[in-house]
């Protein structure tokens, strides 16, 4: 991967894009890696915030979820394609480097969650951790908010789903096993590529591919339902790996796979294009043109029904490969449904005897 322009190692985004909600202008070209002390260039700031609500109702017809919850805003994993980058602008920051370096920590999440799900009017519906940023990103080692959330959900026997790229989830295996004993948990582990060199520039601070496969294996060994999310599929970068990804994750014990085609909405288009022209200049035009081919000639796509699936010849080939992968490696596998009945019996934190 020849690099013709200065490249900021250890991060995904190479620039801070302009925030339309903010009056300040950002320096779009940070000091290159070779000219900066490593500690300065990779410094991450944790900022405690105190939202009044923490559950987000998912209204999108493309996502079969009830509610999502995000203990952290911003994500140090630095995945260059992440759709959640755009939400960082609402807090006054850039979707670029700020998204990876300024992490907002919602310490009151467990308290607010408990107050919400013990209300008489609350009906059990799976809550997703996290619909936006990774609940097991590095900040979780410090704050342990996700673990506190799982403790509360187990106390009230409430269903939950988790999606992550971090093997830190295995720290909470004890709680996941308890939740699973009552069919209250599903886990999704994102596995985007088997190429570790690509992973290091595409998702620079995530767990290694080897570690993610081991995570799937460990969860499956305890009969915890695990989906491998082969997402996003980026044509020209990882679309040729679909069958191999499916095979390896099935061997590790995944019970199903999911996939989406990358879309570069909002500021992400500028961030992604800047990144790929610096990280992979020889492949940049090919990849960008293939993404456009999947979204009606654009890098972005906000249309319900097509935004996550794409359209056109390249998208159709991807869909065919995913369908073949499911047939070859997941034909006889099933994922147990959630138990939605227990929560009513535990709304006061213990089993109601009368």
Image: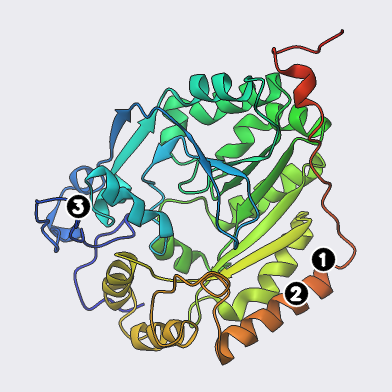
Q: Quadrant of the N terminus?
A: bottom left
Secondary structure found at label 1: loop
> Is 69 in front, or is 246?
69
Could you give the CA–CA distance between mark 3 and mark 1, rounded to whole angstroms?
45 Å
Mark 2 or mark 3, whichever is nearer to me? 3
**Nearer-N-terminus badge (2/3):** 3
Whether residue 327 is situated above or below residue 253 in the rendered picture: below
Label 1 sits on residue: 330
- Which mark, residue 21? 3
Mark 3 or mark 1, whichever is nearer to me? 3
Could you give the CA–CA distance between mark 2 and mark 3, rounded to whole angstroms?
43 Å
Q: How many marks?
A: 3
Residue 116: image location, x then y, percent:
56, 24
Secondary structure found at label 2: helix
Whether residue 308 is situated above or below residue 226 in the rendered picture: below
Q: Is residue 330 left or right of residue 145?
A: right
Proximity of marks 3 and 1: CB atoms separated by less than 8 Å: no
Residue 189: image location, x then y, percent:
62, 52
Residue 58: image location, x then y, percent:
55, 49
Proximity of marks 1 and 2: CB atoms separated by less than 8 Å: yes
Could you give the CA–CA distance between mark 1 and mark 2, rounded to whole angstroms?
7 Å
């Amino acid at each position: 991967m020849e690099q013709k322009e200065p490249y900021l190692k250890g991060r995904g985004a190479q620039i801070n894009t302009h925030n339309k909600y903010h009056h300040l202008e950002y320096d779009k070209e940070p000091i290159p890696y070779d000219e900066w002390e490593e500690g300065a260039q990779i410094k991450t700031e944790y900022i405690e915030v105190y939202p009044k609500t923490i559950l987000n109702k998912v209204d999108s017809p493309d996502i079969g979820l009830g509610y999502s919850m995000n203990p952290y805003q911003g994500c140090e994993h630095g995945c260059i394609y992440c759709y959640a980058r755009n939400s960082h602008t609402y807090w006054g920051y850039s979707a670029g480097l700020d998204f990876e370096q300024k992490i907002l920590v919602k310490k009151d999440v467990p308290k607010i969650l408990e107050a919400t799900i013990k209300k008489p009017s609350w009906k059990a519906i799976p809550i997703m951790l996290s619909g936006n940023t990774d609940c097991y990103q590095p900040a979780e080692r410090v704050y342990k908010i996700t673990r506190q959330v799982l403790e509360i959900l187990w106390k009230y026997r409430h269903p939950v789903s988790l999606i992550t790229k971090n093997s830190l989830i295995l720290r909470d295996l004890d709680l996941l096993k308890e939740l699973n004993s009552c069919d209250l948990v599903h886990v999704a582990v994102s596995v985007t590529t088997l190429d570790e060199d690509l992973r290091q520039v595409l998702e620079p601070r995530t767990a290694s591919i080897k570690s993610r496969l081991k995570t799937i294996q460990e969860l499956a060994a305890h009969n915890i339902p695990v989906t491998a999310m082969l997402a996003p599929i980026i044509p020209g970068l990882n679309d040729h790996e679909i069958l191999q990804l499916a095979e390896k994750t099935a061997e590790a014990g995944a019970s199903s796979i999911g996939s989406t085609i990358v879309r570069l909405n909002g500021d992400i288009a500028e961030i992604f294009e800047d990144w790929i022209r610096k990280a992979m200049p020889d492949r940049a035009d090919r990849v960008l043109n293939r993404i456009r081919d999947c979204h009606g000639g654009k890098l972005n796509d906000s249309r319900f029904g097509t935004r996550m699936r794409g359209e056109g010849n390249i998208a159709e080939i991807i869909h065919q490969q995913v369908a073949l992968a499911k047939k070859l490696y997941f034909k006889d596998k099933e994922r147990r449904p959630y138990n939605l009945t227990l929560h009513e019996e535990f709304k006061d934190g213990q089993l109601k005897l009368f």
